[in-house]
Image (cartoon, rainbow, N blue to C red):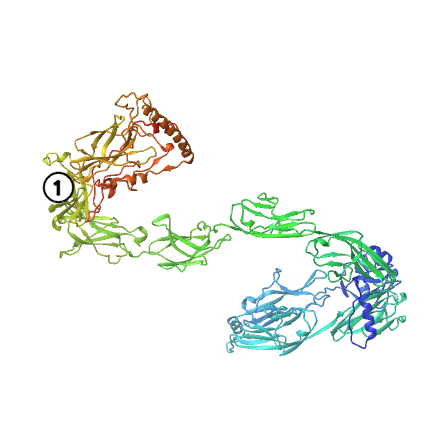
């Protein structure tokens, strides 16, 4: 199916067949396109394109120009009528017509008068196809006449009376604009009391003495001639009642009496309009102005209502202090009764204005030009409305249709002319005139009968480029008479386009609602009518849309920083992309701080003015996309200003201020500070804080302070600079509100009482002459209060007091105005002295070898002579029998137990030692005498490990052990225990051998050992308290000298001891076999060690040791219960000679090694009653010698080989 553009039909009521035929042709009638080439070839009746207004008021000082322009083919000729008769312009030398135009110019500036050419003009434009006419143009010169001379008497009236000053301006053309001014050309002030009416008069609802003046002048401004006319000044004098009585008394005899009464208040009455009702008529579309001005005392207020409805909300305005109601674009619906109400305190009146809205004719449907082909039908419709309803009349070529030449194809039906079977001679210009008593409308519409084959006006091979997914509009501007039908085809084969996919418009345009990539191609437009056919090809390309793939983002930055916006765009590569940045929809400021780099915009040193919306606009020749982001420039607020102090009272004042700019970050709070210029000039103190919504604060004040205030604003970014200080405000002096604080009574000597306090500062003094009244008396005595008044100091010493007696003390502030409130009473004590008595019945209970508990009886409180601080124990280690002789050289340790404790624990004692101690009581002055010394002994404890263990003189079957006794035997050594076990080549442990060695030995030789065998030794000492810590070592028996004796394994640091026996076994068979086995074993070990070296693993010994462990030595193992681990060859380190380190290379402290370190550091440790550390410790603690981790071994072939791996 081919898609065609066919004339659309409209429906009319049945029975009007002629109109149906007409309407069918009317819609199909052509509008002639304004194509230059087409217009050159087509004939067309005249059309008026420009003309002067109907009511044409001219300036008499300038030439008269009456416009009339028209178009047509052939070009029309012009003629004029004036006052209904032909206006022959050739006979008037002052009148010329513009060439190619009908515009008249009347040269009255050289000679002639404008009044001569006043009249009604009409222009006619005519060619062979018809004649068009203009409106009736009424030409009138503007007039600005002078005021008629009149004598104006001065006006004198009483205060409160009403007054109307008439203006009565001269009638001008157009009417003048009225205003009132004085001699200085200053507009007179107007208000609800004094206002100008619509007629120009000046109305006073009531006069006041200040209304007296001699230059009330009404001015009339004639805008058309730019002239102002002035009325004679009017003099007004308003006199008060007293002035009036004085005037009357001066003009009357003594026997006459008259007195003017004060003008009383009165209810409103209307000055305009008069009466209770009035009428108003206005034309549709104009501005309806209703006015009510009332007089009264006090001045009335005006209200407006519409009796039968609401006032239109969007078209109603109040002027002149609501005395004038205006409704714009008034229509017939605005007709009705409007009521104005004048009201004051004494009453109210109302006036009803009946409004009637009339209407000059206005178009409902103006006739339109018709272009028909011979034999077609059509019609012209002319419909207008108005109030009253206008009369419709027709003209043909400017002649009333009743007397125009007859045309058989034409039929008149009221407001419609029906044409049927038109011929070329039917071409004409018809005029429709709609008129009533308020005006007229005139419209020209031509009927042009043409016979033209189709023409396509769109340029051939036009290329259209469209963005994908948008509508594509392919133009096919055409012309033909009769109206051609339009068809569209796509592609070379000419497949017809269907109307379910495409939209074809009446002007021939093909619309593709959603163009896709497959819409690309060549499209052919074909126009046909009965006279011929025309076609045209156009091309369509579909482009990818431009998209912003990363939009600029909202940014909040602080003033002075740098901000960057990013705008990444993707577009069709065949189109040229342009990225433009805008600020607030305008160009970027021409400032070096703005840098545009490809898809980035950077703003450096951001200022307040940089805030706003930044838009990235991406343009191609086909589309445009944009994205915006807002930049908010924030900063700390600007400081507040305009600080003002109000409501100034003795102890409060109100501070108000104006906030500074918040710099786009809301103010959270205001901080108020004060300065005391009298006491602390230059030092600002915090007064209070208020919400950021407040701009006032009620501040509490102290007496006798010279206040200045300042305010700071705080937002999320920080605090503003301080405002300028407020004015100073000095408060009155008053007695102090408070007394000194921190009152104490402590004696510095046994016979005095030192009373101290924290004095008041100048701000707290509340007045001049600050002093203190110091009072005291013994707490337990009956003495009266002793008092003394001292200057502004902070201490007073009372001498001659008993030692350590409680006193009641109070300190009261006073100044020149009076005393502070009664102060609080505090308790103090006179001076302390050293305690007189030592603690008695000192007892010592030894808990274990390192801990003892001491008990004593408390000292009587009276003998302490001060505040009990606690008890102090001195203890030291002493030799029996030399307690007194060497006491001076003995290092003593001290523990202090605070408070009233009567026992304490002594930790960290050495076992098997002789100790002495004494106890002293301590007060604030110092220590009392010492109690008699008490001695005690600590029991034995387990010893420490032997100081060293060395293996010397290794032979084939023996090893000699040499050791040093424990550094701390902690008792009497009873014996040594030696345990040892062999370790085979696979590091498995053999059976454990246990030996007891006398305590007096320091050397022991083990015999009958296996040759070339590694042994591990465990060695420890014993006392009666038990076994001490062990020391371990390893060693290897030797092989034949000269073979391997000189090779030392890397993990053995033993001396190069040689075998004690020299045996020549090199030639013996068993030795040769043994060596072969050793060589094979070494080769295997090399392979195993190479593999272990790469893996880096450890081989467990713990299981082997556990398997052969002696139950007796299990408690002496390390915390993890093992003797450690053996590592592979890479992990072996040489063991230095004399090592006594356990196998895990750590030294475990002896269980009995109780040290004060376990209770805390320093000399002020303390112990609770159960012996926990609360006391004080002094003295030196001997450090234990660091235990090495050395060992001594004889060389072994296995270790020798390991050293080479």
Q: Where is residue 49 drawn, in percent x and y?
A: 80, 61
Q: Position of residue 530 (x, y in %)?
A: 87, 62
Viewport quadrant of the N terminus = bottom right
Q: Is residue 1188 left or right of residue 15?
A: left
Q: Quadrant of residue 426?
A: bottom right
> Residue 618, relative to residue 951: is it above or below?
below
Q: With 555 as the anchor, is 1049 left or right in this view? A: left
Where's the C terminus, which quadrant? top left
Q: Secondary structure at mark 1?
A: strand
- The residue at the far front in this view is 1069
Question: Which of 962/62 is in front?
Answer: 962
Instruction: Specify whether 974 is left or right of 16.
Output: left
Residue 1048 lies, with reference to residue 1109, above or below; the image says above
Give the residue at mark 1: 936
63 or 998, which lies in front? Answer: 998
Residue 1080 visible: yes
Is 8 on the left-hand or right-hand side of 778? right
Compare residues 688 and 594 and report the one nearer the observer: 594
* As drawn, 231 above or below 1117: below
Whether residue 100 appears in this view of the structure is no
Q: Nearer the viewer, residue 1179 or 608?
A: 1179
In x, y percent, where is residue 580? 63, 48
């Amino acid at each position: 199916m081919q898609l065609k553009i066919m004339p659309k039909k409209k429906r009319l009521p049945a029975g009007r067949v002629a109109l149906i035929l007409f309407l069918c042709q009317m819609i199909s009638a052509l509008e002639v396109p304004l194509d230059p080439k087409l217009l050159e070839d087509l004939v067309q009746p005249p059309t008026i394109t420009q003309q002067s207004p109907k009511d044409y008021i001219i300036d008499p000082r300038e030439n008269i120009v009456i416009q009339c322009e028209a178009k047509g083919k052939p070009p029309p000729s012009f003629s004029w009528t004036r006052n209904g008769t032909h206006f022959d312009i050739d006979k008037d030398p002052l009148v010329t017509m513009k060439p190619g135009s009908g515009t008249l110019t009347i040269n009255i500036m050289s000679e002639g008068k404008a009044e001569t050419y006043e009249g009604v003009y009409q222009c006619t434009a005519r060619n062979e196809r018809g004649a068009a006419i203009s409106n009736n143009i009424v030409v009138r010169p503007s007039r600005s006449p002078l005021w008629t001379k009149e004598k104006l008497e001065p006006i004198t009236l009483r205060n409160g009376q009403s007054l109307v000053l008439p203006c009565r301006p001269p009638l001008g053309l157009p009417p003048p604009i009225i205003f009132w001014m004085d001699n200085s050309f200053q507009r007179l002030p107007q208000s609800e009391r004094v206002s100008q009416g619509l007629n120009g008069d000046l109305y006073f609802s009531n006069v006041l003495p200040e209304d007296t003046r001699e230059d009330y002048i009404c001015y009339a401004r004639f805008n058309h001639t730019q002239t102002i006319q002035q009325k004679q000044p009017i003099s007004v004098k308003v006199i008060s009642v007293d002035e009036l009585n004085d005037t009357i008394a001066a003009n009357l005899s003594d026997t006459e009496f008259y007195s003017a009464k004060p003008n009383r208040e009165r209810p409103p009455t209307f000055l305009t309009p008069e009466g209770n009702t009035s009428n108003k008529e206005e034309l549709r579309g104009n501005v309806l102005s209703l006015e009510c001005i009332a007089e009264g005392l006090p001045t009335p207020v005006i209200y407006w209502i519409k009796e039968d409805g609401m006032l239109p909300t969007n078209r109603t305005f109040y002027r002149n202090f609501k005395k004038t109601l205006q409704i714009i674009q008034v229509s017939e619906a605005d007709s009705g009764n409007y009521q104005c109400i004048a009201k004051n305190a004494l009453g109210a009146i109302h006036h009803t204005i009946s409004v009637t809205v009339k209407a000059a004719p206005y178009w409902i449907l103006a006739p339109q030009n018709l272009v028909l082909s011979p034999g077609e039908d059509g019609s012209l419709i002319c419909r207008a409305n108005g109030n009253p309803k206008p009369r419709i009349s027709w003209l043909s070529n400017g002649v009333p249709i009743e007397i125009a030449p007859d045309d058989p194809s034409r039929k008149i039906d009221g407001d419609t002319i029906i044409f049927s079977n038109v011929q070329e001679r039917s071409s004409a210009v018809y005029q429709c005139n709609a008129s009533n008593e308020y005006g007229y409308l005139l419209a020209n519409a031509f009927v042009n009968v043409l016979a033209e084959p189709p023409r396509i006006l769109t340029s051939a091979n036009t290329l259209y480029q469209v963005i994908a997914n948008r509508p594509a509009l392919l133009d096919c501007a055409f012309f033909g008479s009769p109206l051609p039908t339009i068809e569209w085809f796509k592609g070379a084969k000419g497949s017809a386009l269907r109307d379910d996919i495409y939209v074809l418009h009446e002007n021939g345009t093909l619309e593709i609602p959603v163009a896709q990539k497959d819409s690309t191609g060549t499209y052919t437009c074909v126009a046909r009518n009965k006279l011929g056919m025309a076609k045209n090809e156009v091309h369509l390309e579909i482009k990818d849309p431009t998209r912003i793939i990363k939009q600029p983002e909202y940014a909040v930055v602080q003033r002075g920083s740098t901000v960057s916006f990013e705008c990444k765009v993707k577009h069709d590569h065949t189109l040229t992309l342009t990225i433009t940045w805008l600020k607030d929809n305008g160009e970027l400021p021409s400032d070096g701080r703005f840098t545009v780099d490809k898809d980035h915009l950077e703003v450096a040193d951001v200022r307040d003015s940089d805030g706003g919306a930044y838009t990235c606009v991406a343009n191609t020749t086909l589309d445009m996309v944009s994205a915006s982001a807002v930049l908010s420039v924030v900063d700390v607020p600007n400081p507040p200003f305009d600080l003002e102090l109000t409501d100034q009272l003795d102890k409060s004042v109100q501070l108000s201020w104006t906030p500074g700019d918040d710099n786009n970050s809301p103010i959270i709070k205001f901080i108020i500070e004060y300065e005391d210029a009298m006491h602390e000039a230059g030092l600002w103190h915090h007064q209070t804080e208020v919400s950021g919504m407040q701009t006032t604060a009620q501040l509490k004040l102290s007496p006798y302070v010279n206040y200045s205030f300042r305010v700071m604003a705080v937002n999320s970014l920080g605090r503003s600079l301080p405002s300028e200080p407020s004015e100073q405000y000095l408060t009155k002096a008053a007695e102090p509100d408070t007394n000194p604080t921190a009152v104490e009574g402590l004696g510095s000597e046994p016979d005095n009482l030192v009373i101290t306090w924290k004095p008041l500062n100048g701000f707290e003094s509340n007045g001049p002459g600050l002093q203190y009244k110091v009072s005291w008396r013994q707490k337990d005595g009956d003495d009266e209060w002793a008092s003394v008044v001292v200057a502004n100091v902070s201490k007073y010493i009372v001498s001659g007091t008993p030692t350590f007696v409680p006193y009641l003390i109070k300190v009261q502030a006073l100044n020149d105005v009076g005393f502070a409130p009664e102060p609080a009473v505090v308790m103090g004590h006179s001076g302390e002295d050293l305690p007189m008595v030592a603690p008695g019945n000192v007892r010592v209970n030894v808990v274990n070898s390192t801990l003892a508990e001491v008990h004593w009886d408390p000292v009587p409180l009276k003998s302490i002579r001060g505040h009990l601080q606690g008890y102090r124990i001195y203890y030291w280690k002493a030799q029996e029998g030399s307690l007194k002789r060497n006491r001076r050289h003995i290092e003593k340790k001290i523990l202090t137990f605070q408070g009233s404790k009567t026992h304490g624990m002594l930790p960290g004692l050495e076992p098997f030692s002789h100790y002495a101690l004494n106890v002293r009581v301590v007060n604030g002055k110092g220590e009392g005498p010492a109690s008699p010394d008490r001695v005690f002994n600590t029991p034995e404890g387990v010893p420490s490990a032997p100081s060293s263990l060395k293996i010397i003189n290794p032979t084939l079957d023996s090893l000699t052990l040499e050791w040093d006794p424990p550094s701390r035997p902690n008792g009497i050594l009873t014996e040594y225990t030696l345990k040892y076990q062999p370790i085979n080549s696979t590091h498995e442990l053999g059976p454990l051998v246990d030996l007891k060695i006398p305590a007096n030995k320091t050397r022991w030789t083990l015999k009958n050992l296996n040759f070339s065998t590694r042994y591990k030794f465990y060695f420890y000492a014993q006392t009666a308290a038990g076994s001490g810590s062990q020391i371990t070592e390893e060693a290897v028996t030797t092989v034949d000298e000269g073979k391997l004796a000189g090779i030392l394994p890397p993990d053995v640091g033993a001396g190069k001891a040689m075998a004690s026996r020299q045996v020549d076994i090199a030639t013996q068979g068993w030795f040769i076999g043994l060596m072969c086995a050793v060589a094979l074993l070494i080769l295997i070990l090399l392979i195993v060690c190479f593999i272990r070296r790469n893996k880096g693993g450890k081989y467990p010994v713990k299981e082997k040791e556990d398997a052969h462990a002696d139950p007796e030595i299990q408690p002496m193992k390390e915390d993890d219960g093992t003797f450690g681990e053996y590592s592979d060859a890479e992990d072996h380190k040489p063991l230095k000679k004399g090592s006594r380190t356990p196998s895990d290379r750590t030294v475990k402290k002896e269980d009995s090694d109780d040290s004060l370190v376990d209770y805390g550091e320093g000399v002020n440790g303390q112990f609770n009653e159960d012996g926990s550390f609360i006391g004080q410790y002094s003295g030196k603690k001997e450090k234990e010698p660091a235990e090495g981790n050395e060992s001594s071994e004889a060389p072994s072939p296995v270790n020798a080989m390991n050293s080479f791996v």
